[in-house]
Image: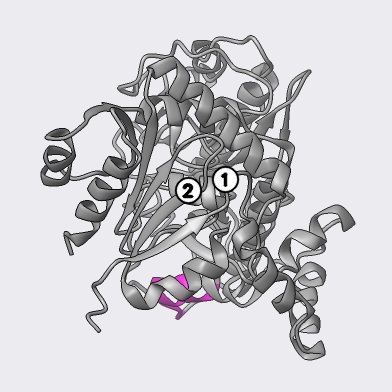
Amino acid sequence: MDRRQFGKLVVAAGAASAASEPNDALSQGPPMQRMALAAASDVLNLPEELRPIIEQHYPRFSDAEYARRHRLLAGVMESAGVDHLLIVSAQNVGNATRWVTNWPGTTEALLIFRPGEPMTMYVEYHNHVPLARMLAREEKGISKVLDELGRRDAKRVGVIGPLSGAKWKTLESKFDLVSLDGEYIKLRIFQKSDEEIAWLRVGAALSDAGMAALVGGTKPGLAEHDLGNMVERAYVGLGGAHVIHFIGSTAMAAPDCCVPRQFTSRRKIQPGDFVFCELSAAWWDYSGQVLRGFTVEAEPTSLYRDLHATAQAAFEAITKAIHPGVLSRELIEASALIEKNGFTTNDDLVHGYGGGYFAPILGSKSRPAGHPPTLTLQENMCMVVQPNVITRDEKAGVQFGELVRVTKTGCESLHRTPHGMFRAGEAI
């Protein structure tokens, strides 16, 4: 059988119950498997309320959480006047199929959603269907969607996710299509549940483990490639997934790196270096983000001491300004210390997070971002505050920050990595 063939799944309308029985059976598992998974909670020192999340063989949210998401989508559909939703993920782009069904999507997944009815999802490749049946409660795929929507007598169809131009045109020949990506993004920014926040805490703990491994294991003679490998080894064995580890290393006496780089190199770490990292590990698609820097067998130079002190002070000023009702432009004002101290920035100062890279995306006064800073903060929004303070010649820089949640009265960090500049080999 051609493995490019799409397999069809019928998924329960209310929750991911179609997959619950196989998962429950797996969760009983052999004793050694259960012990290995439970050890992840101990390694990460998770509080009791988070341990059941990471100890599942394949994690999923509660039925009530999936029902909440389906109600939110029903509201979007009603506002847009559509009778069906087509939710798409392709080549690991688009996470709405995961949000609705728990299936992460691999090559392509095409999900037809209508409130109160069983969902139909077409999954490519054919050999991916067995796992999709467990987790989810060729061009042939779009023709199957066309047939199914026709069978349902669909008229106006909302689309969420990366539906390519050719496939869009195929559907548009039969149905009135409406893009609802913007509405979906708003749900992910403003409608985070307590269960989602709990998963983000697990992602943050996995990210913290990666940062601790990086700081503790870096030593002269290792290449940047070695550092990246060390980071991933800290959480992959615990069930975590790699998202990013941008690593920069440079000699403090003659710096040539102002922001962590997206790809590691064969450059070897030397005494007198400064190393800094932007790191995200995920519990499925719920990742933390932690940013820290450290010196190697040397005290920080006066320049790096000033850069770091400015970054940490900016972080503290920004997080102090965060609370519901604040306009995002006020966070830029809170960072004015950066320019006052004679520095500027390269990376974004703040960005929304938790399910995607979201608004508010803010630059500093001296390096504005392209997004207008008009968004008003709301409770349970999550953001990464990450001042990347650099010299104006862009030769030296530091980055400091982490993922935070907006609370009723301010904000809280979802991370436990200590604040400060570290030294390679230090246990944090």
Secondary structure under badge 1?
A: loop
Could you tell me how far apart the alpha carbons at marks 2 and 1 are, in whole angstroms? 6 Å
At 45% from the left and 77% from the top, the residue drawn is 226
Q: Nearer the viewer, residue 315 or 88?
A: 88
Identify the residue shown where x is 61% and y is 40%. Answer: 403
Query: Where does the N terminus fall, quadrant-wise?
Result: bottom left
Specify the principal SS of the magenta part: helix
Which picture quadrant has residue 428?
bottom right
**309 is within the stretch colored magenta:** no
* Rendered location of residue 160, percent (x, y): 35, 37
Answer above or below: position of 49 versus 222: above
Label 2: state its secondary structure.
Answer: strand
Q: Nearer the viewer, residue 264 or 294?
A: 264
Q: Which residues are magenta?
A: 221-230
Camera-nearest residue between 213 and 267: 213
Picture quadrant where residue 52 is located: bottom right
Q: Position of residue 282 (x, y in %)?
A: 56, 57
The residue type indicated by label 1 comes to Ala
Q: Is residue 28 visible in this depiction of the protein?
A: yes
Q: How does the figure colour the protein chain or chains?
A: one colour
Give how far across and how far down residue 414 sits, in percent: 70, 43
